[in-house]
Amino acid sequence: MLNMISLSAMRIFESAARLGSFRAAAEELRLSPSAISHAIMRLERDLGASLFERTTRNVELTLAGQTLLTHASNAFEDLRRGVELISSKKAQLLRVHCAPSFAAQVLSPRLPLFLKENPGIEVRFAASTNYARFVDGLFDADIVYGEPLDREDLIVIPLGEEIVAPLCSPEMAKELKSPRDLVRQPLIRSDLKRIQWVDWFEANNLGPPPAPTMSFDRSFLAVDAAANGLGVALESDVLARRELDNGKLVRPFAGRCRDTRYIGHYLAYPKSGSQRRLARIFADWLTRIMQSDD
C-alpha cells in the first residue's frame, strides 16, 4: 500500500489537515486550490478512505484523517531533522552542551562577541550537569565541570585556572576584618562545588565552619545571592568575573588567606567527525577569551 502513495500527496494532505483549509495549503505550498483538491481526492481513492468532511465553506478531518495526520506530522518532523543533520546548513550549526553556571556566567555575556567574529555560524546551547553523549550526534562540543573521565576519543582542553575564595558584597566586606569574622556571617553553600567551606576553613586553620545559612545547587545562584547581600559565598572567580568586575562582589581576604586554585572547567569535542572544524573554531575562540580574562 505504501508504494502506491506519493510523498508529494502526503505533503499536500499534511498541510491541508494541519491548516484546516485547502486554500491555505495551496498558499503554503504555492499550488492552486484545484491542485490541492485533486491530489487529496486521488489520495483518498488510493487509500480507500475518506480523509475530509467537505462543506461549502470549510473542510474537517474524518477519524481516518485525524489518525493519518498524527502519523504524517511525526514522519515529516523526523524527515526534517534528518535533512538538517546532513544538510549544508549543519556545517554552520554549532551545538554546545555546557555546565549551567558556566553557560550563564561566562558564555552568555561573551556569546555576542563569538557571533560577531564568526558571521554565519549558528549556535545552539543546552545546559545540564550531565556529560554530553557525542555518539548520538546531538552535540559538537561540551564544557564540563571537572575533567572528563572517558577521553580516549576526545580532544580535551583545560579552560584555565580558577580561584575559589570567599566572595561577598562590598557592604558585607566592611564587617569582615579577619577570616574569623566569617563565623558571625551567613555562609552560602554551593552544593556541587568540589571545594566546600570545611575545606577552606581547614586550609586556613580556622577549625570547623558554622553550618551554611543557605545552599544552592547551581553556582550562579550562589553568586547572585552573595551579590544581593544575602551572605558570603565560596565561589570561583571565573564564574563570578562579571560581578567582581562591576563591583557587586569583592574578595574580602584577597592576599591574606590561602585560597584554592584549580582547573575547574574543560572543553571537550570528538577527535573525528564532520563538525570537528567548527568545534575547533569555538575552542580556539573560548581559550583565547579565557586567557584574556586572566
Image (tube, helix red, strand yellow):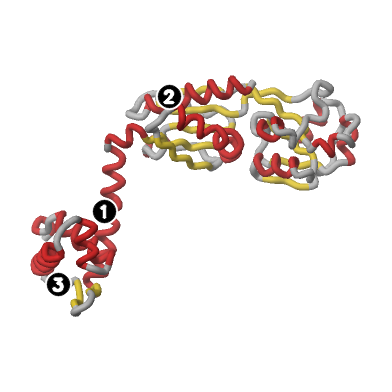
Mark identifier at residue 76: 1
Q: Residues within 10 Å of mark 3 (few under 14, many from 20)?
A: few
Label 2 amino acid? Ile
Q: Which callout, 1 or 2, points at the residue further toward the start of the chain? A: 1
Residue 166 at x, y percent in the picture: 77, 32
Q: Residue at x 26, y 69 (%)?
A: 20
Foreground residue among 278 and 248? 248
For the residues marked 3 and 2, what is the alpha-carbon distance in whole angstroms?
54 Å
Residue 112 at x, y percent in the picture: 50, 34
Q: Residues within 10 Å of mark 2 (few under 14, many from 20)?
A: few
Q: Residue at x 36, y 25 (%)?
A: 272
Residue 9 at x, y percent in the picture: 14, 59
Outermost bottom residue:
55
For the residues marked 1 and 3, what is the alpha-carbon distance in whole angstroms?
21 Å
Q: Is residue 228 above or below residue 167?
A: below
Foreground residue among 10 and 157? 10
Residue 3 at x, y percent in the picture: 10, 55
The residue identified by callout 3 is 49
Is there any visible trace of residue 199 in the rendered image? no
Label 1 amino acid? Phe
The residue identified by callout 2 is 281
Image quarter hosting the N terminus: bottom left
Nearest to viewer (mark 3 / mark 2) = 2
**Picture quadrant of residue 216:** top right
For the residues marked 1 and 2, what is the alpha-carbon distance in whole angstroms?
33 Å
